[in-house]
Image (cartoon, rainbow, N blue to C red):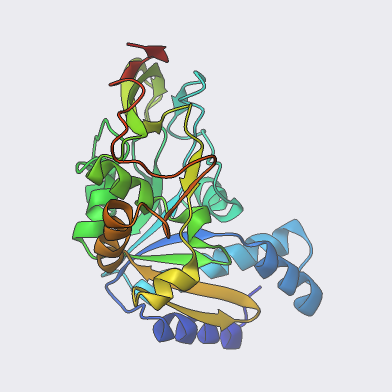
Amino acid sequence: MLCEKTGGELIQALREVGIAGGDILYVSSDVKTFLFNLATEHNVKTRADRNKALDGLINIFQQAVTEKGTLLFPVFSWDWCRGNGFDYKKTKGEVGTLSNWVLENRSDFVRTRHPMYSFMVWGKDAGYLKSLDNQDAWSRSSPFYYLQASRAKQLLFNIEAYQGLTFGHYIEQEVSVPYRHPKYFFGEYTDENGIRETRMYSMYVRDLKVESGCGICNRWLMEKGVAKAVEWNGNLLTVVDLAESYPVIRDDMVNNEGKNTLTFSGGGLNWDNAPAVPYEVKGIEL
């Protein structure tokens, strides 16, 4: 559990890395270190005590941005891609314990609608984000464009950018990298009212012949002046200004072959290459 002193220190740490009331904060996390420290230093070991600690952590993030701000947690899932459908209320994310904990325990958050890239959202813009009905995962009608246009900040809680900066994929689509193409997935979608229907959603997927990934490190973002970091109670908090990072990451991809932002196996970014296919539907190459 977070005592008043520890919680106050976290608020202060967030202020040091630029989080203020009214901010839009997107939290990506690995809470293993956080929970280990609580277990060893404060004897927080039972499920009930861990739940109280996670609840307290969420409350402090809310206090940091205030009701004038907005808080987002990713609950990304690729069950839709695997043909397993999507249930708005039940499909868990695959990108962190804390996000799933919010999904299952915090009724004050709402979920956005995309079956692959949804967020749990609280605060001023929660209603707007829930109302988005973007078909494409990373398009300008998606929450990722909102993050750029609204000058959101992303908190990397005990993780590196290459583990959680999905915003980089949005930029890949913005610049039309040659190793990705649109793919359209059909599946069974169960909405928040339990109504089932067949829907289609898309993602700018990587060509299977290309092995690539995000190569962005926190240190590089800090060297570029678009991120700040601070340690709190044994946890590393790195905050990235997404609007400021956009031109930096874009420039590296377009003019520097992605040397600081992308990783490739057996080659590099070659802008002269064409995508393997123009698009795919239901996994069938056309």
Name which quarter of the figure residue 179 lies in: top left
Which residue is found at the position 31% from the left and 35% from the top? 178
Q: Residue 34: x and y, percent?
A: 66, 69
Q: Residue 259: x and y, percent?
A: 42, 57
Residue in front for this viewpoint, 156 or 90: 156
Q: Residue 113: x and y, percent?
A: 33, 36
Residue 212 relative to residue 202: left or right: right
Residue 250 relative to residue 104: left or right: left
**Residue 48 visible to the viewer:** yes
115 versus 123 height, above or below: above
- Give the position of the C terminus as an image quadrant: top left
Name which quarter of the figure residue 251 lies in: bottom left
- Give the position of the N terminus as an image quadrant: bottom right
**Residue 125 visible to the viewer:** no
Residue 123 relative to residue 161: left or right: left
Residue in front for this viewpoint, 153 or 35: 153
Which residue is found at the position 22% from the left and 49% from the top? 128
Q: Residue 268: x and y, percent?
A: 44, 44
Which residue is found at the position 39% from the left and 22% from the top? 189
Which residue is found at the position 51% from the left and 33% from the top? 91
